[in-house]
Structure formats: C-alpha cells, structure tokens
Amino acid sequence: MSAIAVLKMSRCMGDKIIKASDILNKLQNNAYIISMWNPDVVSLTDFETHVQNFIDAEANTKQRTVGLVSLRDAALAVLMEDLREIRTMVQIIAHQAPDSTEAVIQSAGFGVKKSGHRPKQINAAYNTQIPGTVKLTAEGTRAHEWEMSKDRVNITSLPATQTAYTYVKNLTPGDVIYFRTRKLCTNKTQYNWSPWMILFIGGGGITKGTNNSTNAAGSITA
C-alpha cells in the first residue's frame, strides 16, 4: 500500500488557522524538508506571510465591515494554493524515503491516507545505479518530448520517445540539471510543458528529483 499526503482541512475558519499554523511550524523545524525544498514551490518565507495574512484577515471580519469577508476569502484562496503546492512537494520528497514515507509526511503536518492501488506514474527525474545516467518519467502513456537545461534559459532538446519514459546518459555527476516533458504535439493538439524537475546528478544510486506539480502537461489547444 502507498501513503498519500492529505490536508484534512476543516470548514471552520479557526480550525483552518490552527492547521495552517501547525504545518508552518513543522516545516520551519523540519531540516529534511527544507533541505529538499523545490525552488519552484512557494518559499517558506512567503508561506509564513500568507498564513499571517489569513489570520489577520479573519480577525478583521469581526468588525463586520462590508468587504472584509471578501478580503478574508481572497487570503484563504492564496493560502490554500500554497498548501496544495507544499503537499505535492512533501509527497514527492516522502517517497524518496520508502521506509519512512508516512513519518516524513506527518513530520510536515499533513495527514496520511493509505492507497491499495499502484501509484500513478508522475513527471519525475531519477538518478540510476549507473553514474551519470538519469531516468525521466512522465504522466500517462504514449509519446513524449523531453528537454533539459542547467539554467532553464539555455535549453537542450532530447530525443522524443513513443513511451512515457526515457534515459539520459553521459551526464556529469555533481551537476544540477533541470528536466521537463510534455506529450508529443500533433497538428491538431499542442501540449504544455511540465514544470521543471531539478536533479542533482549522482555518481550511482537511485535518487529522485523534485517538481511542483504532477498534472501540468495538459492540452492547451485542440
């Protein structure tokens, strides 16, 4: 069975404040999560600001002034987007520690749901046992395109595949490289690129890179 990170957010505004504050506190004191924080995810500093903005906005609604509830709801929307991003990141980090996946998820303040189904393949980059060889995977099936970059500005196209995975060889251990993928475009349909997946190229031994979403390779035109 696989462990899935869940938010378990109450409808009560007071409980939302308690939950968000608890996650913030546990992240601030979680060296393991911080050391693997995805740069494409909201920063811990910004998350702390958004938590406080929501707390202040909820307190202001007690004044019963027109418009303050809307401001509170807007602050909540920003906070919830942060929490969804962080939950996805924590899920990816946790699955890099298969012997303690649940403990890692709970250490970040999220609940755990057990799934008896095989986890879906996600957009990810893995070091393999072969030094300098990386395996890339993508959501779904069928043909995919692949790209890599050291700075996300100068981009190298990799060979397209008829599968949802590929291998990149002869990389230099110690380099930090970004990878991304998308379904192979056709004359009728163009697809978005996935978020960049960052990976520290290893000298052998399976490790996984991180990204900030697993569902960003959808169709943008049809």
Image (spheres, rainbow, N blue to C red):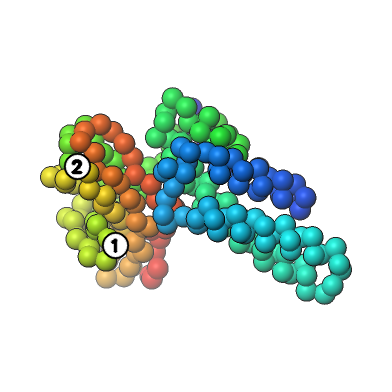
Residue at the limit of the structure toward the left, as seen here: 170
Residue at image coords 78%, 70%: 68
Give the number of the disc on residue 195. none
Q: Tag count in the figure?
A: 2
Residue at image coords 27%, 60%: 151
Quadrant of the image occupied by residue 221: bottom left
Dot 1 corresponds to which residue?
152
First in residue order: circle 1 vs circle 2: 1
Q: Mark 2, residues whose alpha carbon is within 10 Å: few (<14), some, or many (≥20)?
A: some
Percent across and percent down for residue 19 are 68, 45
Q: Amino acid at mark 1?
A: Arg
Q: Mark 1, residues whose alpha carbon is within 10 Å: few (<14), some, or many (≥20)?
A: some
Residue at image coords 30%, 46%: 199
Residue 22 visible to the viewer: yes
- Looking at the rendered structure, the secondary structure element under dot 2 is loop
Whether 56 is drawn above or below 93: the answer is below
Task: Give the label, 1 or 2, closer to the camera.
Answer: 2
Percent across and percent down for residue 99 are 44, 25
Dot 2 corresponds to which residue?
173
Percent across and percent down for residue 118 are 43, 33
Q: CA distance from mark 1 to mark 2?
A: 19 Å
Front-lying residue, 129 or 219: 129
Q: Amino acid at mark 2?
A: Pro
Quadrant of the image occupied by residue 64: bottom right
Percent across and percent down for residue 176 are 26, 49
- Looking at the rendered structure, the secondary structure element under dot 1 is loop
Residue at image coords 60%, 54%: 48
For the C terminus, the image quarter is bottom left
